[in-house]
């Protein structure tokens, strides 16, 4: 049996800020006092003070409630950005892999910022409001880096194009809050208080409307749980009233970061700093679909040579799903072994799955070990537990897609 090099995407320096910490100070969102009043157990996450759970409701109970009904999450810590001007699309496409030009108005796309080696600097959702206005939501832990990426892109584009018309505006949480309503009852609950027909608002589509007594709300049908749901960007001074109105529905409850993390893992979605880092490419992360066809043809995004070569020839490693039916959950950093005990990879995310009743995880393995059904071992606290590679998502997604 040949020996295999241990493959592990190195964690970025920012990855530690992704971990829950209740001892350090952080920024607050417009809903901070509301969380405290409602029994939120506050932790520092990505530099913001947010609830990990509420009162005596366990993370598991909150997770399962989201899957059967609807939960409301405060995600105001995410960086909201607008790019405006005649050349906003060309400017943003210079630093990401999406075909923004090809989007219909008020349509969104998941994409990534890449570096010159093809590594992922962050994942983000871009909504094309029009040819001259874009709306972006990216990760809180990477807000300083993302601001710099966009500022540098702006300077570079204007330097190369003297007549360029493009500007960037970073929206402060004190101005615009962001909440996520997720779960099979989300649409019914929201429809009662919104002035748009949600049945016609499909996955990754966006519209501006009135929610409760809050005008100028951007409602996007998307989320981070695998369930149907919405992200609502609202004026900060109106968000508490908006949230109270939604919570008047018995089908809606508050949920915190703990349930958000287990829900996203069941959905097979990546956590930046753990599952994707500057050392992992979209191909290695099983995200080659984020590199749009037109962008592949133009070869004009950072790291294109590396990424396109991997698309053509394949990569040495791949992000995979793992299931373990026995033992404790496999957490970030746990070693993945072959049947013969060779170290070939590490877990990047892992937790007990409330929906499936077993432990699930993600990690990176050499291509030879990435086929679903492949038996592996995971070393947890000096003991090896049997597991297997499996397809993702672990739990089927329930997005409101447009009929084909």
Image: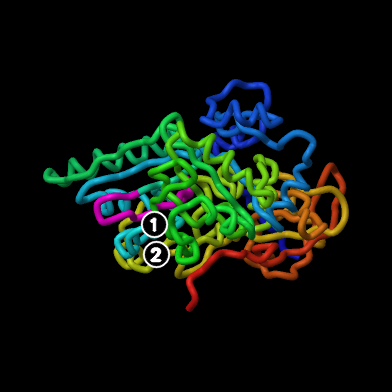
Q: Which residue is mark 1?
A: 97
**10 w.r.t. 357: above or below:** above
Question: Which residue appears at 48% of the width and 49% of the height?
Answer: 123
Q: Residues within 10 Å of mark 1 (few under 14, many from 20)?
A: many
- Residue 22 appears in view: yes
- Where is residue 77 drawn, in percent x and y? 52, 36
Q: Residue furthest bottom?
A: 404
Q: Is residue 316 magenta?
A: no
Q: Which residue is mark 2?
A: 292
What main secondary structure does the magenta stretch of the protein show?
strand
Classify residue 20 as left or right of residue 195: right
Q: In what element is the residue under mark 2?
A: loop
- Where is residue 116 drawn, in percent x and y? 39, 48
Q: Are marks 1 and 2 in contact (CB under 8 Å)?
A: yes
- Where is residue 90 drawn, in percent x and y? 26, 53
Front residue of 146/167: it is 167
Classify residue 356 as left or right of residue 219: right
Instruction: Read off the magenta span.
Output: 119-134
Front residue of 198/174: it is 198
- Residue 11 appears in view: no
Which numbered disc, 1 or 2, marks the residue that appears first in the sequence? Answer: 1
């Amino acid at each position: 049996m040949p020996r295999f090099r241990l493959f592990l995407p190195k964690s970025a320096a920012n990855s530690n800020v992704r971990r829950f910490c209740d001892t350090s100070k952080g920024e607050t969102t417009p809903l901070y006092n509301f969380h405290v009043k409602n029994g939120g157990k506050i932790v520092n996450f990505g530099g913001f003070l947010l609830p990990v759970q509420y009162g005596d409701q366990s993370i598991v109970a909150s997770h399962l409630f989201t899957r059967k009904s609807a939960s409301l999450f405060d995600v105001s810590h995410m960086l909201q950005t607008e790019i405006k001007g005649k050349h906003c699309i060309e400017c943003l496409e210079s630093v990401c892999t999406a075909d923004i030009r090809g989007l219909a108005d008020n349509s969104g796309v998941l994409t990534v910022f890449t570096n010159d080696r093809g590594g992922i600097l962050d994942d983000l959702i871009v909504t094309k409001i029009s040819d001259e206005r874009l709306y972006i939501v990216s990760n809180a832990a990477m807000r300083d880096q993302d601001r710099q990426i966009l500022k540098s892109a702006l300077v570079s584009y204007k330097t190369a194009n003297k007549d360029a018309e493009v500007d960037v505006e970073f929206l402060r949480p004190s101005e615009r809050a962001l909440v996520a309503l997720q779960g099979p009852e989300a649409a019914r609950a929201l429809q009662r208080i919104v002035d748009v027909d949600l049945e016609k608002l499909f996955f990754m589509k966006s519209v501006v409307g009135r929610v409760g007594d809050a005008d100028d709300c951007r409602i996007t049908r998307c989320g981070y749980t695998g369930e149907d749901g919405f992200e609502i960007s609202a004026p900060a001074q109106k968000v508490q009233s908006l949230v109270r109105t939604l919570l008047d529905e018995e089908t809606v409850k508050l949920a915190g970061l703990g349930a958000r993390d287990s829900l996203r893992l069941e959905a097979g979605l990546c956590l930046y700093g753990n599952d994707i880092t500057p050392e992992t490419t979209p191909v290695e992360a099983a995200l080659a679909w984020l590199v749009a066809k037109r962008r592949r043809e133009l070869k004009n995004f950072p790291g294109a040579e590396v990424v396109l070569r991997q698309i053509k020839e394949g990569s040495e490693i791949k992000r995979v799903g793992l299931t373990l039916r026995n033992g404790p959950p496999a957490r970030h950093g746990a070693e993945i072994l072959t049947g013969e005990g060779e170290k070939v990879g590490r877990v990047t995310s892992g937790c007990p799955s409330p929906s499936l009743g077993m432990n699930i995880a993600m990690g990176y393995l050499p291509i030879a070990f990435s086929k679903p059904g492949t038996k592996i071992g995971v070393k947890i606290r000096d003991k090896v537990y049997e597991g297997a590679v499996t397809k993702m998502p672990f739990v089927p997604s329930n997005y409101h897609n447009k009929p084909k």
